[in-house]
Image: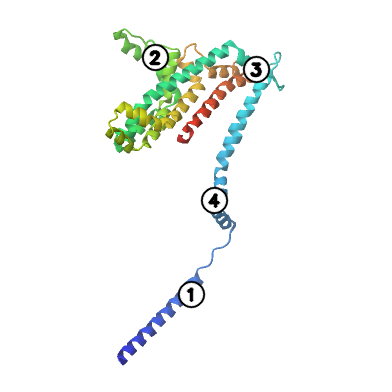
Amino acid sequence: MRRLLKVDRGLGRDQGLNLATHEATSAEVTHSVPSPRRTPARRTSAYLTKHPRTRLALLLSAPLFWLVVVYIVALLLLLMTAFWRVDTFTGDITREWTFDNIVTVATGALYQTVTLRTLGIATAVTVIDVAIAMPIAFFMAKVASPRAQRLLVIAVLMPLWASYLVKAYAWRSVLSKDGILEWLLAPVGLHSPGYGIPATVLTLSYLWLPYVILPIYAGLERVPDSLLEASADLGARTTRTMGSVVLPLAFPAIVAGTIFAFALSLGDYITVNIVGGASQMLGNLVYTNVGAANNLPLAAAIALIPIAIIFGYLALARRTGALDSL
C-alpha cells in the first residue's frame, strides 16, 4: 500500500511538472507571436466579411456601371434622336421634339414591307433551328454516354470559334451558281437556291444553331430519367413520352433557345448583305440611314421597331419561365 501511495505521489508530481512546463511553454509561444496590426486593409477585410451584401455590391459595381452607363444610357441617348429632325438645307440634326420620324416609319409602305420580311425571316430561322436542335439536344442529354456528351458539346461549340464573316462568306460560296451545292444537286435535276431570302434563312439558321442547342440541352439534362422510365413502364410510346413528359418540362428551355435565334436574326444586317441579294431587312435600313443617307433620327426611329418586338417577345417568354433557363 505504501509503495502504491509513493507511486501515485510520484505520478502526481510528474504530471504537475509537465503541466507547469506546458503552461510556461504556451506562455512563451503566446508572448513570442505578436498580434496583427490593425491596418486599413485588415479593417476593410473584416468589415466586408461581416457585411456580405456590401461585398456583393462592390463586386458587381464595375459590370453594372458598364451595363447601365456605357450601354443602356448610350442606347437611350441614341433612341432619343428618333424624336429629332434633320434640317433639309444643312443636313444637321435639329434638337426639336417631333413625331415625324415615328409617323414615317409607322405608315410608310417600305418600312411595313421590310418589317414583315424581317419578322418572317426571324420566325423561319427560329422554327428551323428548334426542329434541328431538339433531336440533337435530346441525344446529347439522354442517350449519349458522358464521354460522348463532352465531345458533342465541343462539336456544337466549334463553329463559334470561326469568325462570323468567314462563315457567312463560306455559305455565299456554297450557295453560288458555281458552288458545291449546285454541283451536288445538278445530277438530280435540282439547283442551288442562289442568293435571296432562302439563302438568308439557311445561313442564319446555321449561324445561330449552337445558341439554340445549348439551352435546350441544359433543359433536357434537368429532366429526370426516372420520369422517362416510368412513362415507358406504363406503356407509353416514344411519341407520347416526348409530347406528354419531355416537351412540357423542357418547354422553358426551348423558349430560351428561341430567344437567341429570333433576336439575333431580327437585328442582323450583314448576312442579308452577303447572301440576300437585293433583299433588305430592318438592320439594313438602319445601316443605310446612319451611313449613306446620314439621317440618324430616321435610323433611330427604324431601330425602335426591332427593339419593341424583342421587348414584347421577352415579356411573353418571361411568362413561360424561359428567362430562368438562360
Res. 167 visible in picture: no
**Is residue 150 rendered to the left or right of residue 77?**
left
Element at badge 1? helix
Of the two numbered discs 1 and 2 on the same chain, state the one appearing first in sequence. 1
- Residue labelled with disc 2: 175
Look at mark 4 in the image and give the residue it sits on: 52
Amino acid at pointer 3: Asn
Mark 2 nearby-residue class (10 Å; few <14, some 14–19, many ≥20): many
- Image disc number at residue 101: 3
| N-term mark: 3 or 1 | 1
Residue 82, numbered label: none
SS for callout 2: helix
What is the x, y in percent for residue 135?
34, 27
Which residue does the image show at 39% across and 27% down from the upper left? 159
Spatial CA span between label 1 and label 2: 85 Å
Local crowd at mark 3 within 10 Å, few (<14), some, or many (≥20)? many
**For the residues carrying marks 4 and 2, which lies nearer the camera in this image?**
4
Is 223 situated above or below 79? below
- Of the residues under marks 4 and 2, which one precedes in the sequence? 4
Residue 323 in view: yes
Residue drawn at the location 31% of the way across and 88% of the way down: 4
Q: CA distance from mark 4 to mark 2?
A: 56 Å
User: Residue 123, percent across and down?
Assistant: 46, 20
In what quadrant of the picture does the N terminus appear? Answer: bottom left
Q: How many marks?
A: 4
3 and 4 marks in contact (CB < 8 Å): no
Q: Nearer the viewer, residue 46 or 312?
A: 312
- The residues bearing labels 3 and 4 have C-alpha atoms spaced at a distance of 49 Å
Q: CA distance from mark 4 to mark 1?
A: 36 Å
Q: Circle 1 sits on which residue?
A: 27
Q: Earlier in the sequence, mark 4 or mark 1?
A: 1
> Disc 4 or disc 1, which is closer to the eye?
4
